[in-house]
Image (cartoon, rainbow, N blue to C red):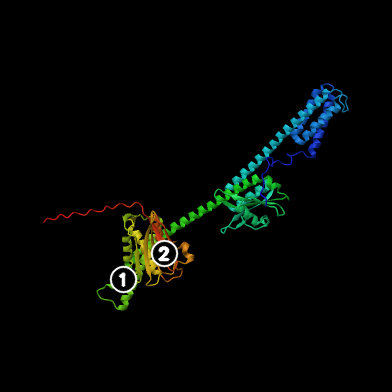
Amino acid sequence: MPLIGNAPQDAFVDDKVAAGSFRNYLLAFVACGITTAVASPLSKYFDLANIVMLFLLTVLLVAVRLGRGPAVMTAFLSVALFDFFFVPPQLSFAVSDFQYLLTFAVMLTVALITGQLTAGLRQQAELASIRERRTHALYEMARELAGALTIGQVAEISRRFLRNVVHVQAALLLPDRNGRLKSAEDDNDERSRWVELRMALLAYENTACTDLDAPHPVGYFPLKAPTRVRGVMAVASSGASTSVLNEHRELLETVASLIAIAVERLHYVEVANSAQVQMVAERLRSSILSAVSHDLRTPLTALVGLADSLTIAKQPLPDQLRETAEAIRDQAIRLSGLVANLLDMARLNAGEVKLRKEWQPLEEVIGSSIKLLARNLADHTVSVHLPTDLPLLEFDAVLIERVFCNLLENAAKYSAAGSPIEISARRRDYLVEVAVCDQGPGIPEELSPDIFEMFVRGARESAKAGVGLGLAICRAIIEAHGGSIAARNQPERGACFVFTLPTGSPPTIETEEPVPDISHE
């Protein structure tokens, strides 16, 4: 699998710019004959030096119009005709005067130099013209690619350019979500059947290469965009040799670069559109949550109050009715908590919550959280392990208390009665790491990546209360404090939720000096 080699500078020269064909040589021969016919009657009136100028003019014109090869032939033929028809003795190649030999040499030298220079200039002009046309074609292709809206349009534009300008077939291979190369075309027709995926993958991972085992040589060029390789461009020549691919390597690499930039642009346009749709959907969802939460809180508060009034009425209710009233009260409180979670999530997503940070010890907010959840934690033993040198932290006590409450409630909900729950903290560089661990079944592996998303629960079909907002609220609060939160399963049993808070620069607490005992005897 040889790599495609470099092309010579005149690789773009057409067949008509190369060495003259048989037709050009024939025209050069006719031009010499015409010059001889014109010069014959003029030789009676002009000196032979002037006749030589006519032949030099013929060499110049042939070089301009027909190229280098016919010009060289014209130079030799002009010397021969001048000697045969005009130099005494005429109609013979014999030379009577030695000075004519010098004339022939000078004439041949001037003719050859003139022909070579003129033909070279003509070839350079043709080469510049061809490059100009191809540069213009590249510009038009780049302009069309800049306006392309789909990958299919990019493939069609590039295929049309390569077919019309380079005269090769082309196909685009782009990776799917699984990283496998697939044709960028909407249909699987004969246009891409000649592509060898093994060779395309080799070019995608390494560099440009050529498949010589195919009936027609196929070149594979990676689409190198500014960020990464976006795919592979495969081109197949109609001939049986690699000359076309070799000669046009620079052009093909340029086309591949333009295609790569267009594909990357479409990728980022798709990403931006997707992000915009997500933002709009998130904003709409937050608005709905906020509106529904506000509308539900008032009747729920009234429902809790009415249930409380039934349980504390002056005339005691029968046991069955009292139990019913207590059940109504408990369920209303639980529903009120769910609505409060919805409202908090909506506020956090909308950025309406302002942190009221204060420097305070972590153990106080842990203690208040455990006290608030005394009823939920009645069947569990909660142990707290905090180092003695734990610094003061700057946080919003109400929100961090909410984090602890949600994590402790989850631990109690998903672990068996009587199992312990452990809260620990340790200092790590400029962070304080806090962990809440339980002895429950742990986090299902399929839910681990999305456990902190909204409406994701530890068990999909579960009779346990909740709508899957607690952990999402925890993440929003911790990230608002400049920390992070993660979940992991313990080696033996249970899950651990670990979050971090920055230590910052806590204020120094001055130790009070002991007051001297001033007692009067």
- For label 1, the residue is 307
Residue 377 is situated, as x and y percent measured from the top left of the image, at: 35, 69
Q: Is residue 149 visible?
A: no
Q: Secondary structure at mark 1?
A: helix
* Residues under numbered marks 1 and 2 in contact, where contact means CB atoms less than 8 Å apart: no
Q: Quadrant of residue 71?
A: top right
**Could you say which is closer to the camera, residue 312 or residue 479?**
479
Q: Quadrant of residue 178?
A: bottom right
Q: Three-letter amino acid code at disc 2?
A: Cys
Task: Select label 1 or label 2 by which is in front.
Answer: 2
Mark 2 packing: few (<14 Cα in 10 Å), some, or many (20+)? many
| Residue at 24 percent of width and 74 percent of height | 314
Q: Three-letter amino acid code at disc 1?
A: Ala
Q: Would residue 398 be found to the left or right of residue 486 on screen?
A: left
Q: Which mark is residue 11?
A: none
Residue 302 is situated, as x and y percent measured from the top left of the image, at: 32, 67
Residue 343 is situated, as x and y percent measured from the top left of the image, at: 38, 61
Residue 297 is situated, as x and y percent measured from the top left of the image, at: 35, 64
| Residue at 60 percent of width and 49 percent of height | 259
Q: Cα distance, mark 1 to mark 2?
A: 37 Å
Image vertical order of residue 83 relative to residue 432, above or below: above
Q: Which mark is residue 496?
A: 2
Mark 1 packing: few (<14 Cα in 10 Å), some, or many (20+)? some
